[in-house]
Image (cartoon, rainbow, N blue to C red):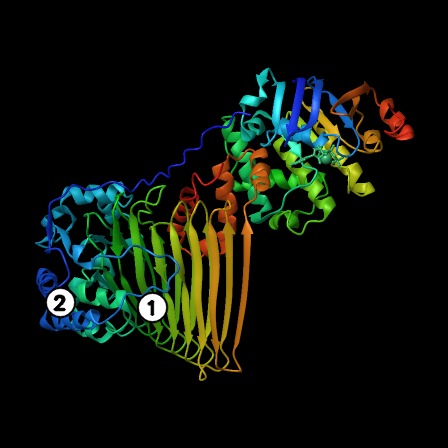
């Protein structure tokens, strides 16, 4: 599904990623851990098409060169990023944002647009699963939402859009214990043989709830070690300092 | 990363010209030209005298220059003050007699007069350069006593109403452009709603400038008699030309006891090209008088076009308990400039006014909100609430807020709020990540920003206006 070969990424002449390689197959869940500033968010931004990076190497998503696709075209193809810091957009009603987003993606795929009633039905269902207070959906997008609510809102969007590749950038940071469990359930319910996940986290605990197939350690711009879930435990014990 | 070219040139779909034979007054401004206009309109003598008085006054006035957008000196002798399609010199009685080229023009503008005649809902007065070419639903409105006709017709058929109210809100001796208009105004709409009547449909005037080197000086007069209600909308477009054309209209509204007038404008005059060449100078005087007790006047404007927009739709709250409202969206892109806002003059007791202004600037444009709230010492227990929000796109445009506040009554209350925000790259990225293209993203954010004002528009036009807001900002991202 996703093949990253020799990815090199610079920002303002500073090298962030170098010789980065990763392959994710359909249905797999990969976790990436790495110290602050190691380039985890940079990687998620490059995958989802944020501008402003100097990149070289190759990224194939379902055998298509991602560099040839605009940000929104990648979203249409099924790439979703749950932001580490979700944006506030004053004036824009959350429900309207969700509906516009869903319909833009459906339209690009040649699917039928949902009308207001169909959409509200869908959103109600998903919000209930995530124990997300529906009232909040009538507020301006993320404006006045607590840190945890913003993160949950990202997962709500993910479950509505049902993406093929979901990238979760530290979604667990800032969630309370119950919310963590709910979010994990949300992710697990989307786990299917065609849906893949790239989960960026600092804490092993999330991986107790979402069992990854692979864990990678990102340091110095590349993956220095890969393994199974046990790698996360090892990392938690040793810390990055002693890991090398 | 490969970036797709976003077409920078804004697509102004109303930029075509209708090739039609015109009758024009000789170029320039003088007594002969004013006589020409008056004669072409077959006006009574009192009207010509009125025009002449205005002209005498005009000669002694100085062109103002306190506004923020400056413009090259206008040569008032180099303008045609009257231009009309030849076919309209004999007033056609109905649409079937109208020049097919005119019908075609309005069809292209999205106002199919003939089909529209059959649909129920909105009565349209179509003004083409200096004349009104058609008014629909006249008969149906007549049944309830509503008069909706070209002002040139009202001058002849309803002189008592015109003489009583014309110039009663914008006097002959008002400022430079208003006085110029009084001397040379050509056409526009006249509306009278009799006592107790709720106008059964939306009234609408569509202004079209077609001829080159021609100024448009329209005049609109709306009178809502006691206990009546009317909702009126005007729309405007013009061809794309390298020259700047002057549009100096006067609009007067009068609301008597318990009457309400809702006046909406969707202004989409040609804004000039990407480099700021050409476009309309939209210098308009709009003023409403809440003459009676409990009367209400509400202005809603969506200003997206014109090279320069310079206007302050105002309310004089004379009747006790009267209400004035001003809802505005002004958008400037490329090299457009706007200096717009409102004046709320509180004279009566318990008068209320509300100002909601949303300014959006993009490209190299410049936007000024200028507003006056004046509460006189007699206007006891009056209130004003003002909210001015500016949204900037990019960092080459400007936004300014200049509120003037005069409160001479200690029992009255003025509240003012202002914000300035920016559409950030991060917000656009976030929207794009969710599948919206940059234009859709901007449209969504901007429409969210102006929601409060868009909601004020009549339903039929809200959707159009929403689209227009998006289109006006096309090419401003990326
Ligand atoms: N716009 C930018 N300009 C300059 N440097 C940047 C920019 N964006 C990111 N960086 C730098 O790139 C490096 C990687 O940042 P990134 O956000 O990818 O780290 P991260 O692994 O997600 O860290 P964290 O765990 O703290 O979220 C950091 O040193 C950061 O300061
Ligand atoms: Mg990060």
Bin the neighbour count of mark 2 within 10 Å (Cα to Cα): few under 14, some 14-19, many 20 and up: some
Q: Residue at x 9, y 72 (%)?
A: B45
Chain ID at mark 2? B
Residue placed under numbered mark 1 in the picture: B287
Residue placed under numbered mark 2 in the picture: B156
Q: Which part of the image, by quadrant, shows the N terminus of chain B?
A: top right
* Relative horizontal placement of residue B469, taking residue B92 as reference (left or right): right
Q: Do dots 2 and 1 share one subunit?
A: yes
User: Looking at the image, in which quadrant does ligand 2 appear?
Assistant: top right
Q: Residue at x 61, y 37 (%)?
A: A122
Any atom of ligand 1 within 8 Å of the CB at mark 2?
A: no
Bin the neighbour count of mark 1 within 10 Å (Cα to Cα): few under 14, some 14-19, many 20 and up: many
Q: Nearer the viewer, residue A81 or B331?
A: B331
Is residue B454 positioned above or below A15 on the image? below
- Farthest front residue? A13
Any atom of ligand 1 within 8 Å of the CB at mark 1?
A: no
Q: Secondary structure at mark 2?
A: helix
| Marker count (numbered) | 2
The reply to whether residue B93 is visible in this rendering is: yes
Location of residue B100 in the rendering, given as x and y in whole percent from the top left corner? 15, 42
Answer with mark 2 or mark 1, whichever residue precedes in sequence: 2
Is residue B185 positioned above or below B237 on the image? below
- Farthest right residue? A237
* Relative horizontal placement of residue B470, taking residue B84 as reference (left or right): right
Location of residue A68 in the rendering, given as x and y in whole percent from the top left corner? 54, 22
Q: Residue at x 28, y 72 (%)?
A: B174
Q: Residue at x 48, y 39 (%)?
A: B477
The reply to whether residue B203 is visible in this rendering is: no
Location of residue B370 in the rendering, given as x and y in whole percent from the top left corner? 43, 64
Q: Nearer the viewer, residue B116 or B35?
A: B35
* Relative horizontal placement of residue B463, taking residue A207 as reference (left or right): left
């Amino acid at each position: 599904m996703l093949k990253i070969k020799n990815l090199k990424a610079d920002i303002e002449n500073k090298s962030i990623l170098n010789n980065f390689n990763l392959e994710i197959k359909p249905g797999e869940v990969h976790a990436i851990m790495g110290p602050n500033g190691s380039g985890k968010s940079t990687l998620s931004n490059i995958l989802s098409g944020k501008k402003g990076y100097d990149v070289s190497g190759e990224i194939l998503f379902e055998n298509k060169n991602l560099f040839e696709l605009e940000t929104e075209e990648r979203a249409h193809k099924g790439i979703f990023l749950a932001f580490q810091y979700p944006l506030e957009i004053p004036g824009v009603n959350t429900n309207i944002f969700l509906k516009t987003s869903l319909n833009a993606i459906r339209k690009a795929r040649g699917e039928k647009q949902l009308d207001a009633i169909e959409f509200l039905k869908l959103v109600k269902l998903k919000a209930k699963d995530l124990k997300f207070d529906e009232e909040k959906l009538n507020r301006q997008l993320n404006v006045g939402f607590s840190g945890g609510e913003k993160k949950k809102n990202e997962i709500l969007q993910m479950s509505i859009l049902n993406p093929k590749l979901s990238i979760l950038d530290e979604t667990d940071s800032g969630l309370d214990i119950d919310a963590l469990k709910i979010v994990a359930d949300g992710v697990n319910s989307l786990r299917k043989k065609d849906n893949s996940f790239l989960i960026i986290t600092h804490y092993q605990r999330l991986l107790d709830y979402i069992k990854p197939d692979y864990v990678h350690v990102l340091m110095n711009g590349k993956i220095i070690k890969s393994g199974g879930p046990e790698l996360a435990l090892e990392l938690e014990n040793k810390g990055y300092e002693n890991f090398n | 990363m490969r970036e797709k070219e976003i077409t920078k040139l804004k697509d102004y779909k109303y930029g075509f010209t209708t090739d039609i034979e015109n009758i024009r007054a000789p170029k320039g401004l003088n007594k002969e030209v004013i006589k020409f206009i008056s004669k072409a309109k077959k006006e009574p003598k009192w009207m010509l005298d009125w025009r002449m008085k205005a002209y005498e006054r005009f000669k002694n006035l100085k062109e103002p220059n306190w506004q923020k957008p400056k413009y090259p000196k206008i040569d008032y002798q180099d303008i045609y003050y009257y231009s009309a399609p030849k076919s309209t010199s004999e007033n056609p009685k109905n649409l079937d007699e109208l020049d097919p080229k005119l019908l075609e023009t309005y069809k292209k503008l999205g106002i199919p007069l003939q089909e529209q005649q059959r649909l129920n809902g909105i009565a349209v007065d179509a003004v083409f350069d200096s004349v009104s070419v058609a008014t629909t639903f006249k008969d149906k409105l007549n049944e309830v006593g509503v008069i909706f006709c070209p002002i040139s017709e009202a001058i002849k058929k309803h002189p008592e109403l015109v003489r009583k109210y014309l110039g009663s809100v914008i006097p002959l001796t008002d400022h430079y452009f208003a006085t110029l208009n009084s001397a040379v105004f050509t056409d526009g709409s006249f509306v009278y709603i009799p006592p107790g009547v709720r106008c059964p449909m939306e009234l609408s005037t569509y202004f079209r400038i077609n001829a080159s080197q021609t100024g448009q000086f329209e005049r609109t007069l709306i009178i809502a008699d006691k206990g009546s209600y009317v909702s009126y909308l005007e729309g405007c477009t013009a061809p794309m030309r390298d020259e700047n054309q002057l549009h100096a209209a006067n609009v007067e509204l009068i609301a008597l006891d318990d009457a309400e007038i809702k006046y909406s404008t969707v202004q989409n005059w040609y804004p000039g090209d990407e480099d700021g060449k050409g476009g309309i100078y939209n210098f308009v005087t709009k003023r409403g008088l809440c003459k009676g007790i409990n009367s209400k006047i509400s202005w809603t404007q969506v200003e997206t076009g014109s090279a320069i927009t310079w206007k302050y739709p105002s309310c004089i709250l004379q009747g006790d308990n009267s209400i004035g409202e001003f809802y505005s969206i002004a958008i400037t892109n490329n090299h457009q400039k706007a200096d717009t806002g409102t004046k709320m003059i509180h004279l009566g007791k318990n008068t209320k006014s509300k100002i909601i202004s949303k300014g959006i600037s993009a490209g190299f444009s410049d936007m000024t909100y200028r507003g006056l709230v004046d509460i006189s010492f007699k206007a006891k227990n009056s209130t004003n609430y003002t909210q001015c929000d500016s949204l900037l796109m990019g960092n080459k445009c400007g936004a300014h807020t200049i509120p003037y506040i005069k409160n001479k009554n200690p029992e009255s209350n003025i509240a003012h709020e202002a914000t300035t925000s920016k559409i950030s790259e991060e917000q656009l990225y976030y929207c794009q990540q969710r599948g919206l293209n940059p234009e859709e993203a901007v449209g969504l954010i901007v429409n969210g920003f102006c929601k409060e004002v868009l909601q004020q528009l009549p339903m039929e036009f809200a959707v159009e206006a929403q689209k227009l807001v998006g289109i006006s900002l096309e090419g401003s991202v990326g």
